[in-house]
Amino acid sequence: MDSIFREMTRRVPFLLLSLLVTLGCGDDDETVVPDAGTDAFVPGADAEPDAAADLGTDAGREDGCMETTGVAEWRLDNIDDTGVRIRGDLGLELGESPWGLHVWFQRYGDTPYEGVVELGPDTANESFPHCPHCVVALSGADEVNPMHGFFARSGTIELVEDAFSPRKHFILRDVVLGEITIEGIESTWVPDGDCIALPAMLEVEQAFPPEAWRCDPNTYGAGDACDCGCGTWDPDCFPCDGILGEECDEEPLPVRGCDTGQVCGGLEARCYQDCSETGTCEVGTCVWEGLGNRICDNDPDHFDPAQLGEECGPGAYGATYCGEQPGYAEGVCSEWFAGPDEPTVWECRAFCQTDADCDTENHEYCEVVYGEVAGYCLPDYPRYWTCDPTAYEDGVCNCECGAPDPDCGLPQDLPASSPDCAADQVCVFQGQFDTLGQTECISAVVNDDCASAETVTLPFTGTVDTRGAHNSYLAASCFRSERWGLDSVYAMDLTAGEAVDIEFTTTDDDTNAALYVVGPGDAALCDTDFTCEAAVDDGWYGEGETFRFTATDAGRYFLVVDCFANRLVRGQLSISAVE
């Protein structure tokens, strides 16, 4: 069962990420990542209607449910950047081995992780494993047979403390688990399946230290001291952990486990001799560590023999020191930003606290990383920049310099004007999806807004290629989500009641167009929060769009060829009058 859960832990976030990445130009409103149950699997969808109804949302104790008197020996089952899962012994013999009850909190967008949360169908937690608050009992499975288990079909979970805090405190009330099977990453209710009734109130309040924790479990995240030397970091050592973009007014907690003159540091959360005053060590080597402390480190695995400017490696430790001198180290192995197709190069770089500590004449600056009080010197331009270093981020968009210049704007804002390009050209990325690689000058798209729209005479056939166009319009009122793609605009002068057939055919598999009509009026109409007279986005990648539009009033109408994300559109556009 552990291997199955690991696979699901890996596959679910990967699936969500894959769906997000593939949100491109086109029918993406109908291809949404299940957001806390919005478009998730509907329980009973594959079962007979009456059978699905039998698994209803009644929170009472139905006759026939197996009952358990409690759940024992809660322990941490898994924790990573996607969520945290704990497991307790269910106290029921189902088959050959006892089952465990898993409570799994997964990070899903803006889902709340405090307060009372409903479980079961028609809630954010209607299917497994697409649930931000999963309550499930599981058995094992092999590669062929689907996983079998019981998933919460009614009841509530009250999160007394944040679900991702080191000490869990939650209450399950009136929870009934219904029988399910899970094949791949999709759960299905078992028609007329069994059920398990948990106690009317089941409260969990305890700390869940990771496996590497060697001290008393009750001291983990207890809020009274930073316990050092326990095999891994105590959350109490980071009172402001998770606070971004604002001042932290929490006072550091006292350190427990270290002697006078020692500080808690390193990835292993050990006690080290403090060398912040002396700058050198009689035993070990004085280095900066992640919290901004200067410590005497004598672990040979943390050091590389390279001197400043020489190639070195990051090592298993994650921060490998180098430039070692008697009693202290001059630097750390760091990566100088490489191109997307270039191998990673690690180089011994000098420690610094301000830019003045670096070789500013050779365009170095201090990359502050160690507790925001120290860092290492790096060139202020990427390693694959081919132009004069002084041209990087100098206020002018420099194109065709081997790396994108921040002065050209954000990737979603390109194309940009550049003195490197001709008057009728703009600066864009070479690859449609490569927003880190080379930029180049190409011909600008002339008709990329209503003011410069190409006026068409019916019948019209033309080639559309929006590479070199801007993201002129979002069309927020025309679709369920905004259209951030690069767009081209065509103007049609129509009489009242005149109808036209509009057809767009793609010429590559990466195109997924969205078309909409604005008007009647002049070009200034497009500068407002316009409402579309018509909008279509039915096709998928490599598919086209076809629709008929009838003018309600006489005047000029603007047809915009757009797409969902920051992508280009390529294809053939045909507009013909309906006889």
Image: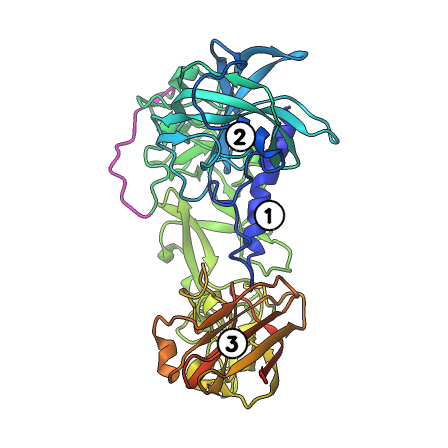
Amino acid under label 2?
Ala
Closest to the observer: 169 or 554?
A: 554
Label 3 to label 1: alpha-carbon separation: 64 Å
Residue position for label 2: 53
The crowding category of the residue bearing disc 1, from other C-alpha atoms within 10 Å (few below 14, some 14 to 19, many at least 20), is: many
Q: Which residues are magenta?
A: 245-257
The crowding category of the residue bearing disc 3, from other C-alpha atoms within 10 Å (few below 14, some 14 to 19, many at least 20), is: some
The crowding category of the residue bearing disc 2, from other C-alpha atoms within 10 Å (few below 14, some 14 to 19, many at least 20), is: some
Expressed as whole percent of the image width and height from the top left, the position of residue 54 reads 54, 26
Expressed as whole percent of the image width and height from the top left, the position of residue 15 reads 59, 45
Expressed as whole percent of the image width and height from the top left, the position of residue 446 reads 50, 85
Residue position for label 3: 549
Q: Secondary structure at mark 1?
A: loop
Which quadrant holds the C terminus? bottom right
Residue plotted at (44% across, 63% down): 482
First of labels 3, 1 by sequence position: 1
Which quadrant holds the N terminus? top right
Q: Secondary structure at mark 3?
A: strand
Which of the 4 image quadrants contains residue 274?
Answer: top left
* Side (left or right) of 180 relative to 156: right
Amino acid under label 3?
Phe
Residue position for label 1: 312
Residue furthest out toward the right: 144
* Side (left or right) of 323 relative to 473: right
